[in-house]
Image (cartoon, rainbow, N blue to C red):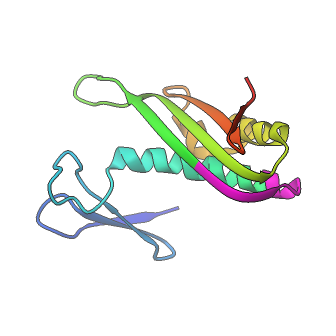
Amino acid sequence: MKITLNRINDDYLFECTNSLGNKILLDNTSQSEGTKGVSPMETLLMAVAGCSGIDMVSILKKQRQEITKFSAEVVGERIQVDEAKPFKTILVTFFVDGNIDPKKAERAAALSFEKYCSVSKTLEPNVTVNYEVFVNGEKVGI
């Protein structure tokens, strides 16, 4: 796996490109005026959501669950460590609508974080990643 990063303005705007030519823009969002991309830390939260979301949709489709809507919200809590501010905890909240068995949705999330999601596994043991699942507006699981 390889990406390239190129600075595309006189400030902090970077274009990152993967081997297939797909691109995202990264920027220094602490410079609130005129930013055109997302921060590197925001992309990490996006990566957790995307990785686990792909896992969940894949698992639920294999179980023949009918997903009409799928979304997630991710909140990261950061701590000060010397000059850096890494994440201490991340909470991923999934919202799944459709003809879905709530137990299957909860199990899909558990499988993602316990077994499949490479992004959250990469963060272990330094970051605690928790999740919750809502099916058709109702919270499931513990």
Q: Position of residue 84 (x, y in %)?
A: 27, 31
Q: Position of residue 130 (x, y in %)?
A: 59, 29
Q: Farthest residue toward the right?
A: 64
Depth check: 131 or 13 in front?
131
Which of the 4 image quarters holds residue 33? Answer: bottom left
Which residue is pictured at 26% across the width and 56% down the height?
Answer: 27
Depth check: 71 or 91 in front?
71
Up the image or down, 15 lies above or below 61; here it is: below
Up the image or down, 109 lies above or below 71; here it is: above
Which residue is pictured at 73% across the width and 38% down the height?
Answer: 115
Depth check: 54 or 34 in front?
34
Is residue 64 rendered magenta in the image?
yes
Is residue 67 rendered magenta in the image?
yes
Q: What range is drawn magenta here?
A: 59-71
Up the image or down, 8 lies above or below 81; here it is: below
Q: Is residue 37 left or right of residue 119?
A: left
Q: Farthest residue toward the front?
A: 137
